[in-house]
Amino acid sequence: MRRYHQGTFQHCLLVTGVAVGFGLEFGFAGPDVKRLGMAATLHDIGKARIPLSILDKPGRLDPDEDAIMRRHPVIGYELLKAIPDISPEILDGVRHHHEYLDGSGYPDALTAPQISDLVRLLTISDIFAALIESRPYRPAMPRPDAYKILCGMDGKLEGSLLNAFRNVALVA
Ligand SMILES: [Fe+2]
Ligand SMILES: [Fe+2]
């Protein structure tokens, strides 16, 4: 991933730092923090198969490009599932980090009961990291503003987790 797309690689490192901090804040035990960190490191590995013209497009993706971009969780899952050291929790995180509690996410339109704590923490960490990074089409957002956006995603993210995330989002 580092060789293919520097921006995605850096994003994965940032998500890992945020997610591990969140896991510790949440009270995850050591092995769970480790799994969460590994899932965060690998979560966007499927983007290694997405054309650079889409990853680096300055501006919004058109519907066809968006459909291709939305394949990255399944691509990542397929890339990793044959590797024995990759646990089911990590595969779950890679495949489902764009799912929302209300069923509006992708690729499997999961709903709350099907979304594990690890995935919930990963999703929050991922969105937050994406907002505080600069992108080709927008500058980085201050942390408090990014946290406010997360809190406005009604029904999609777990409120009690967002409360716990406050310390991670605003202190680090
Ligand atoms: Fe992603
Ligand atoms: Fe991501």
Image (cartoon, grey):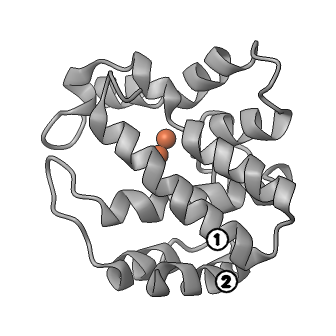
Instruction: Using a 10 Å C-alpha cutoff, classify the residue at mark 1 as few (fewer than 14 neighbours), some (14 to 19) or many (20 or more).
Output: many
- Describe the element under mark 2 as helix, strand or loop: helix
If the image is split into quadrants, where does the N terminus sit? top left
Total numbered circles: 2
Task: Say if 32 sits above or below 79 in the image.
Answer: below
> Which quarter of the picture shows residue 61?
top left
Q: Which numbered tag is attached to residue 22?
A: 1
- Relative placement, left or right, of 79 versus 126 is right
- Give the spatial CA distance, label 2 vs label 1: 8 Å
Camera-side residue of 23 and 120: 23
Residue position for label 2: 164
Residue found at x 48% / y 73%: 150
Residue found at x 58% / y 36%: 42
> Farthest top residue?
82
Amino acid at dot 2: Ala
Instruction: Using a 10 Å C-alpha cutoff, classify the residue at mark 2 as few (fewer than 14 neighbours), some (14 to 19) or many (20 or more).
Output: some
Q: Is residue 29 visible in the rendered structure shown here?
A: yes
Residue found at x 64% / y 36%: 94
Task: Say if 34 sits above or below 55 in the image.
Answer: below
Q: Whole-percent x and y of residue 16?
A: 55, 54
Residue found at x 66% / y 34%: 95
Q: Which numbered tag is attached to residue 145?
A: none
